[in-house]
Structures are given as C-alpha cells and as structure tokens.
Image (spheres, grey):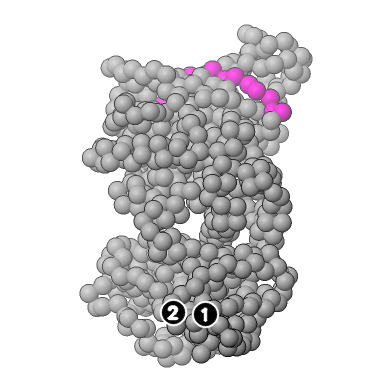
C-alpha cells in the first residue's frame, strides 16, 4: 500500500498529539495541538466516530461548522495560532468496515482514516505520545524517540521523519524484539504465538535494507518495524510494514513479500507518487523486489515470472485493459495485471534497452533528486534519459500511453543456399498500430544455436539472416523478454481466464443450502466482479466463460452438459477439493471447482484466489497439494525451416 503525496506547495502544519487508548473497549482520547501559519480559516477532516469535546485557539473557545466530511473554523488571520483539539470516541470494531478498526488483539489507525484533524492539502509534521494499558504496545510511523513501561501501562513517543502524511498508529498485545546492532535498527512487533519467528524476520529485513541501500541510496528513515496485524493484509507504511498474523508464518512472506514492503520505503514513501500522473511505484517495486529475487535464483525462475505476467495479461479481457499511465492503485485483480505486472515488465524492457549500468545510474539519480518529495512517470523518464544519454520519449509514450500490447506473428519464409552458407528470409508482422521493438531471436542450425537481436518498427519487416550451417528452426523472443499478447496456442487456460472476465456465468451444482451458501461466498471472493448466477443448462447454451462450483458426484453430468473432455489429472479421492480449467469448442474458458462438501469448499475461500495463474490446483483442506499448467504448443513465433 502506498500513500498519496501532497503537493510541493501544500501547507506545512505541526501536530503535537497525545493519545490515550483502551484497545479492549476501543475508547480513545486525543489531544492535538495544531500550530498554524497565519490564516483566516482552517479546513480539516475528522473521522465520524470522533467527537470534538472542546476546540480552542490560543485559549479562546471556537465552534467549527461542518459540511459533509469537512469542518471549517474561522480564525480571522490570527498570527501563529495554536488550535487545541480535545477529541473522544470509540474506534470501530473490524466488522463495521471502517477505515480504522480495533479490538483487544489489535488497533489499526492509518493516517488516511482522519483520526486526527487532518487539514486539506496539508503536509504534516508531528510529535506523537501514546499511552496504552499493560500488556499492549504501540508503534507508529515516524521515529521512535522514547519508550517506557510502568504499572499503568506503556508510553511511547514518536516524531515525524519529515513533513508528509498524517501519522499511522498500531497497537496490539505485542512481544517486541529488536536488532540494535543493525543499521538502521530493525524491530518486530508480533503477537505472542508469532514470537518464535522474530529472529528470522529480523535477519531477512536487515538483509533487504542492506540490499536496497547498496542499489539505490541511504535508507530514508531512522528504523524499520514489522508489525503483525489481526487483519488479513500486507501493507507498507513509512518505516514499517503491517502484515496479517495468519500470513506471517507462510514462507513466501519472508522470502519475497517482505522485500517488496521494505523497498516501498524508497519507492512510494521515500519518494511519494504523483498520483495525478499515474502510479509508477508498484511496478518499480515489483521489478526490483519480486522479480529481482526470482532472478537471483536463476534465469529459468525469472523467465517463469515473465511468462506468468504474460499469461495473466492474456487472460485480461480487452475491455478491462487500461493505459499504464491511468493506473493509480490496486482496486481489483485487473488493475494489478496492468499496474504491477505490466509496469514491472516495462522496467525489464527498459533495462535491456539502455543497459544494466545506465539503468542502475538512473535509479540512484532519481532517488537523489526526488527523495522526501514526490515524482511522476515523467520524472522517471528524465532520469533514464540522462543516464542513457539519449531521448526515451518514444519508449515511455508507447508503453505508458497506449493500452494493449504488441501482437506478433511470422509470415512466409525462404531459405537459400549460398556459396559460403545459407540465407534465411522470414517476414515478421505486427497487428494493428506497430510498436518500436528490440527483439532477441534464436536461429537453430546444424552447428548449434545462433543468437541475434533485431529492431523493428513497421507493421511488416522481412528479416534476413545468414549462417554457415543449414538453418533448421527459428524462435522469436525465445526467453519471453518482450511484453506482448500471447496467442491462444501458447498460453494454457488458467483461473484468471474466468475470474477476470466481467461476463462470467456462475453455476452452483449442489443439493444442500449450506453448500450453496459456501459456493456463493467462494464466488464472491474468487471473481473480480460481482457474480452472475444461472443454471447449468443456460451455461451449455452460452459462449461466455463459466465458473462451475459443484459437489464431486456432479462432475460427470457437468462434463457431459458442457461437452468437456475429462480433466487430464483429476484430484484423487483423498483430496478434499480441486479447481481446474478447460476450454469449450467456442473457445470460452470453464473453471470447475469441485469439493467433497460445504466445509471443504469454505476451506478454499482464502487460498484459491491466490492461484489465479494456475491451470489446476488440488487441495487437502486449505493446503494446495498439487498445482500446475496444462501443456501448450510452441506458438506463432516458432518456425521449422527444414
């Protein structure tokens, strides 16, 4: 999660905040002394669950007026006025769906929830003092300055690293571990059952901080904390990450996702995003964290991740595609396909366009120029152009401002014998408005494989390749280094072919009301848009994608009604549930989810949506036992030449 930066000309306001919080009841008392520059009015927002018990300006009582979500108080140009807000309220329970939430196992007060009187277009500088009862610990964005405990509870003080967004505050029954010898210091605030994980998380976080300092520049905050959350989230804030307590034990969190959240302290927090001109930070963070870690393990793992991004994009219906510059944040899976995956792929292509050394120089330059400020795609383009020593406007224009992706295909070819070898001519075509592309190719000959690089910018280009030995085959983009729309023949059906499509028809085949209720809960979580239900017979007549959620004993009927081939590798009877894809004669994708009973179906609600890039997944309870992709052909960019 990223924070929206404020305008460079935004007003800078200091908040001196005292908080007294009772997590079990949610009761909270806040005193906020706000120091303002001279002005006639002060406009601010405040969460609806808070009440202003008293408001004064330099000791004189004031009565604010309210219109919708905004308050206004008249100051008549008082010089150096200090507003004193005395607030009281009850933090909403999590079931209420509020931006802020609380309970005995944790309180979540993000800065954007307006739990302090947040001025409109205001850059916040702050000092924050928090008191919580015994057994509870508080952590907040900003620098931890002092901390002490006594019989009355714990009191902690924090200060803003620099003026920016309002503070975020987290409280819970945490056990705190610290790595003081690391620079910066690293802490874990974990629920008691997670305390045994602290040392491995401290090690991992310290390693990621060292990695990104070496790649980009100095870490921008005084310390870094990992906080366990009662919510099923993984969020990045300045100087900390807030991660669901059920997620923290999973291996991928420490091995990959933690790196992503650490890196957001540079991209998204250290340099804020100019959201009015698109969000670059998620793509860059995905590329330098998730992808780079895959690349560390080898070329095959890196290629697998690029192929996964391409398969996800192939599953995205054209009507849900958007230009990358329009991406602001992840509101659904379709946005992630563009704003995270495609954006990361754009950085991958840029790295090969300008070279490794220039790419690294550009990122360090971008950091030095924009840290503690905010930046746009245009600022990134300027940094990469400086590092490359040439304009890159054509590159950024075609990848940011256009929706879609190149569609490539091979045309006719001819191989001629020469006096000293062979000449291969082959047509390479782009459908639609052409892109300017640099492409790798492999020419397989009797003597081995020759690798070349070609550039094309026209709708049709005839490649001419000479070789000493007889050519046998040609493969364009053999390592999948180009972001393009895959042909149906080179991508298997995956869950996202169904879950991303807005016209998917959902069919539930099960006798009990309990099973139907579990199926509807799963469909709501799995699909990217609200489910549309219908009977199996209607699905047989439709050409749209279909999601079928059924009991195991209905499988034969489903396959016969939809005219599907039996699944290649069905789940064994010992497994509780399975999900697999198929294609109908019309080309429409079908996703079948079959479970032993309603309990087995409910066990899929949390894990199954995370396997959208797979063709099949078989479960024992909530644990995936087998998963994979259906085999595919080589695709339209491979050609046998003999």
Left/right placement of residue 266 relative to residue 152 reads right
Which residue is depicted at the point 31% across and 62% down? 622
Question: Residue 289: image x %, image y %?
Answer: 45, 48
Give the answer, above or below, for where 434 lies relative to 242: below
Q: Tag 2, which secondary structure?
A: loop
Q: Per the image, is 487 magenta?
A: no
Left or right side of 92 for 435: right
Residue 468: which disc? 1
Q: Along the line of sight, which residue is nearer the eye, 382 or 255?
A: 382
Residue at position x 42%, y 26% from top?
21
In depth, the one of 124 and 597 nearer the eye is 124
Q: Which of marks 2 and 1 is nearer the N terminus?
A: 2
In which image quadrant can residue 629 be found? Answer: bottom left
Which segment did they paint magenta? Answer: 9-23
Image x and y of residue 431, in percent: 68, 76
**Is 85 located above or below residue 202 in the figure?**
above
Magenta-drawn stretch, dominant element (helix, strand or loop) = strand
Q: Name the residue under label 2.
A: 447
| Magenta region includes residue 18 | yes
Q: How many labels does the image show?
A: 2
């Amino acid at each position: 999660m990223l924070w929206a930066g404020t305008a460079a000309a935004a007003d800078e306001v200091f908040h001196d905040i005292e908080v007294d919080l009772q997590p079990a009841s949610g009761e909270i008392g806040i005193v906020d002394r706000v120091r303002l520059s001279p002005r006639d009015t002060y406009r601010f927002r405040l969460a609806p669950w808070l009440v202003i018990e008293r408001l004064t300006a330099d000791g004189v009582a004031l009565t604010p007026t309210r219109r919708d979500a905004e308050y206004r108080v008249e100051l008549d140009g008082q010089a150096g006025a200090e507003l004193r807000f005395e607030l009281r309220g009850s933090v909403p329970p999590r079931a209420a769906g509020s931006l802020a939430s609380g309970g005995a196992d944790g309180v979540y007060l993000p800065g954007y929830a307006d739990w302090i009187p947040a001025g409109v277009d205001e850059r916040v500088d702050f000092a924050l003092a928090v008191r919580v009862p015994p057994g509870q610990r508080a952590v907040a964005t900003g620098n931890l300055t002092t901390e002490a405990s006594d019989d009355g509870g714990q009191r902690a003080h924090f200060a803003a690293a620099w003026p920016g967004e309002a503070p975020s505050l987290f409280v819970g029954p945490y056990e705190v571990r610290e790595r003081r010898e690391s620079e910066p210091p690293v802490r874990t605030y974990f629920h008691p059952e997670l305390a045994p994980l602290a040392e491995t998380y401290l090690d991992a976080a310290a390693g990621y901080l060292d990695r990104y300092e070496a790649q980009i520049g100095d870490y921008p905050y005084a310390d870094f904390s990992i906080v366990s959350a009662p919510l099923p989230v993984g969020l990045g804030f300045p100087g900390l990450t807030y991660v669901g307590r059920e997620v923290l034990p999973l291996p991928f969190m420490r091995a990959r996702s933690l790196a992503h959240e650490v890196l957001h302290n540079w991209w998204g927090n250290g340099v804020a995003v100019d959201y009015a001109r698109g969000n670059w930070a998620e793509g860059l963070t995905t590329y330098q964290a998730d992808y780079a870690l895959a690349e560390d393990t080898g070329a095959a793992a890196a290629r697998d991740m690029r192929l996964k991004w391409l398969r996800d994009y192939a599953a995205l219906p054209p009507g849900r595609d958007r230009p990358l510059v329009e991406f602001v944040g992840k509101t659904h899976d379709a946005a992630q396909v563009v704003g995270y995956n495609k954006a990361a792929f754009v950085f991958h292509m840029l790295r090969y366009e300008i070279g490794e050394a220039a790419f690294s120089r550009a990122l360090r330059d971008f950091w030095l120029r924009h840290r503690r400020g905010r930046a746009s795609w245009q600022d990134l383009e300027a940094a990469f152009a400086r590092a490359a020593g040439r304009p890159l406007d054509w590159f950024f224009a075609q990848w940011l401002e256009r929706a879609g992706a190149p569609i490539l295909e091979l045309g006719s070819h001819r191989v001629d014998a020469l006096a000293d070898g062979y000449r291969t001519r082959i047509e390479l075509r782009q459908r639609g408005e052409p892109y300017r592309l640099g492409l790798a190719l492999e020419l397989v000959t009797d003597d081995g494989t020759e690798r070349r690089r070609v550039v094309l910018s026209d709708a049709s280009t005839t490649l001419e390749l000479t070789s000493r030995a007889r050519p046998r085959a040609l493969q364009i983009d053999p390592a999948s280094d180009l972001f393009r729309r895959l042909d149906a023949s080179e991508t298997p059906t995956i869950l996202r072919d169904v879950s991303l499509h807005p016209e998917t028809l959902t069919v539930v085949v099960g006798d009990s009301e309990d099973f139907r209720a579990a199926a509807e809960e799963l469909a709501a979580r799995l699909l990217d848009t609200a489910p549309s239900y219908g009977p199996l017979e209607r699905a047989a007549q439709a050409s749209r994608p279909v999601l079928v959620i059924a009991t195991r004993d209905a499988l034969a009927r489903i396959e016969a009604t939809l005219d599907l081939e039996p699944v290649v590798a069905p789940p064994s009877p010992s497994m509780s549930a399975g999900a697999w894809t198929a294609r109908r004669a019309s080309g429409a994708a079908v996703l079948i989810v079959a479970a032993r009973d309603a309990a087995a179906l409910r066990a899929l609600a949390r894990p199954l949506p995370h396997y959208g890039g797979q063709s099949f997944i078989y479960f024992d309870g909530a644990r995936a036992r087998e998963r994979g992709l259906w085999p595919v052909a080589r695709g339209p960019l491979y050609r046998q030449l003999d």
